[in-house]
Every structure is written in C-alpha cells, then in structure tokens.
Image (tube, grey):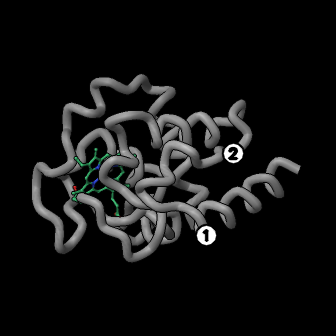
Amino acid sequence: MQKRTLFALLAVLAAACSPAAGAARPTPDPASSAGRGAQLFSGTGRCASCHALTAGTIIVGPPLAGVASRAGTRVPGMPAEIYLEESILHPNDFLVPGFEMAQMDSTLAKSLTTTDVADLVAFMQTLQ
Ligand code: HEC
C-alpha cells in the first residue's frame, strides 16, 4: 500500500514538479522516513532551492531525478546510500562533473540532525 502511494506520488512529481511547484508538492506518507525526507528536501532554503527533481532542469545543482540509480556508480566501491549521505555531509569530496566546488553549502549539514540526513537519504533513494 505504502509503496503504491509512493509510486503514484512519484508519477505526480515527474509530471508536475518544477521549482515553482515545489511548495505545493504532495509528499510520500509523511510518517515514513522517505516522507520526512521529502518534507525536509522542500523546506525553505534547503535542497529544493538548488535541486530540481525533473531530469534536465538545473537550478544551481544537478537535478536529482534518477539519483538513486546513479548514486552507486559515482565513486568506485562506495554504495549508493553512503554516497547520498556523503553528498550532504561532505559535498565537496566528490564533485558532479560540470559543477563547481563549494556551490553546495557544506554548512547546510550542520542544520540537520542525523535523523534528518537519514530521512533525506531515504527520500533520495526513491528517486530512481
Ligand atoms: C546552494 C545550492 C545547493 C543546495 C542548497 C543543495 N545542493 Fe546538492 N548540490 C549542489 C551542487 C552545485 C552540486 C554539484 C557539485 C557537487 O557535487 O558538490 C550538488 C550535488 C548534490 C548531490 C550529488 C548528485 C549526483 O548526481 O551525484 C546530491 C545527492 C545532493 N547535492 C543532495 C542535496 C541535498 C539532499 C540537499 C539538501 C540537504 C542539497 N543537495 C542542497 C548544490 C546545492
């Protein structure tokens, strides 16, 4: 059931997500880790101000559509989950080709709890 809701949501996201629609976007089951992550992602001044969820849309950073699928291929030997976590905690350790150092604020992580980071990773893992 929860998975079904998530898939329906992702279809809506894919169709309707644009930077302007960010605030109105529905989220996965808000009680789930991915649901909390989705809310954190769209929070004011957070991830969604730089990352679109639609392929091809660059705000400041790369769009995160499909990030779950490529996360495990970015750094040899580094599993997807760790890469996604590292992307938040140490954004400059690996730079996505075509993007510059220090654009993703490394102090951002300081405003997030360990649970917040885990929830954001859970959310990004739904972005197949
Ligand atoms: C000020 C703009 C900005 C904000 C805010 C921001 N990012 Fe980023 N992000 C970037 C840029 C630029 C890159 C590419 C350079 C790099 O790899 O550090 C990036 C890279 C990433 C990547 C790697 C994507 C890939 O394809 O490998 C992930 C994952 C990511 N960000 C997640 C997040 C999350 C989660 C948040 C919120 C907690 C966030 N970002 C907030 C600008 C931003």
Percent across and percent down for residue 105 are 19, 41
Label 2: few (<14), some (14–19) or many (≥20) C-alpha neighbours in 10 Å: many
7 or 13, which is in the foreground?
13
* Residue at 31% from the left image edge and 65% from the top image edge: 62
Percent across and percent down for residue 114 are 44, 26
Residue at disc 2, secondary structure: loop
Residue at disc 1, secondary structure: helix
93 or 44, which is in the foreground?
44
Percent across and percent down for residue 103 are 15, 51
Q: 5 left or right of 91?
A: right
Q: Earlier in the sequence, mark 2 or mark 1?
A: 1
The quarter of the rendered structure image containing the C terminus is bottom right
Residues at discs 2 and 1 in contact (Cβ within 8 Å): no
Image mark for residue 64: none
29 or 117, which is in the foreground?
29
- Evaluate whether residue 75 shows in this view: no
User: Residues under labels 2 and 1: Cα distance?
Assistant: 15 Å
Q: Residue furthest bottom?
A: 56
Mark 2 CB near ligand 1 (8 Å cut): no
Question: Residue 58's image quarter?
Answer: bottom left
Q: Amino acid at mark 1?
A: Ala
* Residue at 61% from the left image edge and 57% from the top image edge: 126
Location of mark 2 (residue): 28
Q: Amino acid at mark 2?
A: Pro
Location of mark 1 (residue): 15
Label 1: few (<14), some (14–19) or many (≥20) C-alpha neighbours in 10 Å: few
Above or below, comparing residue 13 to residue 118 in the picture: below
* Residue at 36% from the left image edge and 70% from the top image edge: 57
Percent across and percent down for residue 23 are 50, 43
16 or 79, which is in the foreground?
16
Q: 15 left or right of 112?
A: right
